[in-house]
Amino acid sequence: MPQVEERIDVIERDVTDFKNHVRLQNAMLTKCGEQLSDLRMGQHELQKGQEELRATTAELRAGQEELRAITDDLRTGQDELRKGQEELRGDTAAIRETLEDFRGLFAFVMDEIRLQKAWREEFSDKLARVIAKSEGVDA
């Protein structure tokens, strides 16, 4: 009977090890789910940033159209041209400031895109390792 008892002990240890392995896999899957949720939130924020960037671009284009109209009106007369030149200088400074703001926002969005890409690559590597471990393959 000692052999049977030894076999039962071995089986009980195997069952305990298996249960622990399943708990670990469940914890890893939960963590993966949390990370996927974080990724979706990041993607949503990125999409909002892209929409804001598109709106800013449209506003800049509208501003450029306004400048063209002002320039055409200024060409109608010598006195009006001088007045228009002063106004144009002021408008140009404002446009440069707006363009600098746009460039800053664009650089920020690009930095965020790079960070998201790096984070996705890191997450993909981690996920691949988790999957490999869960399948019993060394990554």
Image (cartoon, rainbow, N blue to C red):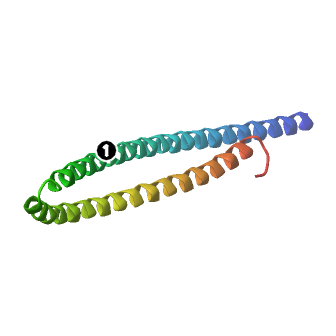
- Left or right of residue 103: residue 8: right
Residue 117 percent location from the top left of the image:
55, 53
Q: Which residue is mark 1?
A: 58
Note whether 106 is above or below 137 in the view shown. below
Which kind of residue does numbered mark 1 sit on?
A: Ala
Name the image quarter holding the N terminus. top right
Note whether 93 is above or below 40 in the view shown. below
Q: Quadrant of residue 6?
A: top right
Residue 121 percent location from the top left of the image:
60, 52
Residue 12 percent location from the top left of the image:
76, 37
10 Å neighbourhood of mark 1: few (<14), some, or many (≥20)? few
Give me the residue at 30% from left, 47% from top: 61
Q: Nearer the viewer, residue 43 or 6?
A: 43
- Left or right of residue 108: residue 130: right
Give me the residue at 64% from left, 46% from top: 127
Q: Nearer the viewer, residue 109 or 39?
A: 109
